[in-house]
Amino acid sequence: MRLPANLIVRRKGASEDYPCQVCWLDESYLSQVEELQAYILETLPHKELYFPLSSTELVNILTRQDGLALGAFVAERLIGFGAVYYPQDNEDNLGRDVGLFASEFKHVAHLEACFVHPAYRGNRIQTKLGELLLQQVLSEKEYRHLFSTVMPANSPSIVDKFVQKMKIVALKQKYNNSWRYIFYRDLWVEEDFKERAAVPVPSSDLQQQLTLLNRGYQGIGYRKTGTGLEILYDKKANGKNKILNATLLI
Ligand SMILES: CC(C)(COP(=O)(O)OP(=O)(O)OC[C@H]1O[C@@H](n2cnc3c(N)ncnc32)[C@H](O)[C@@H]1OP(=O)(O)O)[C@@H](O)C(=O)NCCC(=O)NCCS
């Protein structure tokens, strides 16, 4: 596995930059990851913004049994975490939510949890970790379908998923019945959203987004407004997709 990266980050309220090392994590980092995750939960303005990974899920990812994880460190202290999860045939495979054929489940990767210490937010660490994780996923060749869930109120994570060339294909009640966008990217087919006309909808307007998604629209981008984000919706391209069943087309 390729060695990841060295970043330069700025601490909130400080004027100097700090070197930040990015490393692949193994099970020896479990307690540090759990400690940071607990701190993130404690300091969240809305508890529904982040649904934590259980110790078992973390161990399975850190031991590379069903995923991989990166850590960002400043002065040898963990300040950021990002993970990919390979759900295979598990119940939580997001392919099930969008009608992906079961034979494709083994090709699914989830961009899973990511969290950054509040003092180091604003450095786009989520996107940097995501890019490194995706490079690794792409190098493994067997993964084609990239999924991720994001809460509509989580602006930095929405921005991040669009930067990773993903699109919104569904909006569903997931963890504890909390609403989540389901983001998707076909890693084997490049999609160009640039020239497409789009309908802007505030990310807080769930009803209009559900209506558009039910009519075959997809969220292909965003724009920042003074108060948050608008999601740009466009009708998905026609054409049969052979890897999906009849219910929903990615
Ligand atoms: C989500 C999280 C990891 C992002 O941290 P980060 O990588 O430091 O993200 P940044 O603060 O640099 O923001 C990334 C982008 O979102 C934008 N953004 C952040 N907050 C925003 C807001 N309220 N409205 C609009 N855009 C916003 C930033 O401007 C930036 O956009 P840019 O790249 O165009 O400049 C961090 O907020 C976190 O740990 N949150 C708690 C856990 C969580 O929610 N994890 C995600 C679900 S798994």
Image (tube, rainbow, N blue to C red):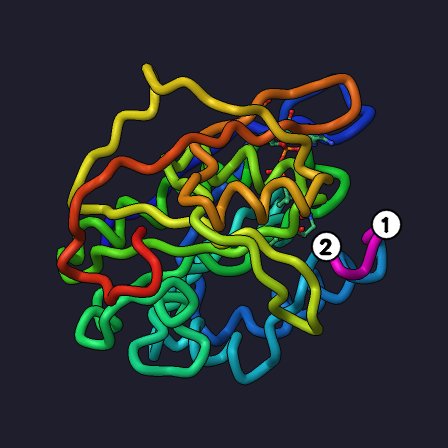
Q: Which residue is depicted at the point 34% across and 59% down?
A: 248
What residue did someone put label 2 on? 49
For ligand 1, give the image quadrant.
top right
Using the image as rendered, state which of residue 44 and residue 55 is in the foreground.
Answer: 44
Disc 1 secondary structure class? loop
- Label pair 2/1, CB-CB below 8 angstroms: yes
Q: Quadrant of the N terminus?
A: bottom left
- Residue visible at 33% across and 37% down? 236
Q: Residues within 10 Å of mark 2 (few under 14, many from 20)?
A: some
Amino acid type at circle 2 is Leu
Give the quadrant of residue 66: bottom left
Q: CA distance from mark 2 to mark 1?
A: 8 Å
Residue 81 visible in the snapshot:
no
x and y percentages locating residue 144 in the rendered image: 21, 55
Amino acid type at image mark 1:
Pro
Whether disc 1's CB lies below 8 Å from ligand 1 is answered no
Q: Is residue 47 above or below residue 90?
A: above
Count of picture labels: 2
Picture coordinates of residue 44, whole percent (x, y): 81, 53
Q: Pointer 1: what residue?
A: 45
Q: Position of residue 76 (x, y in %)?
A: 59, 50
Q: Nearer the viewer, residue 191 or 39?
A: 191
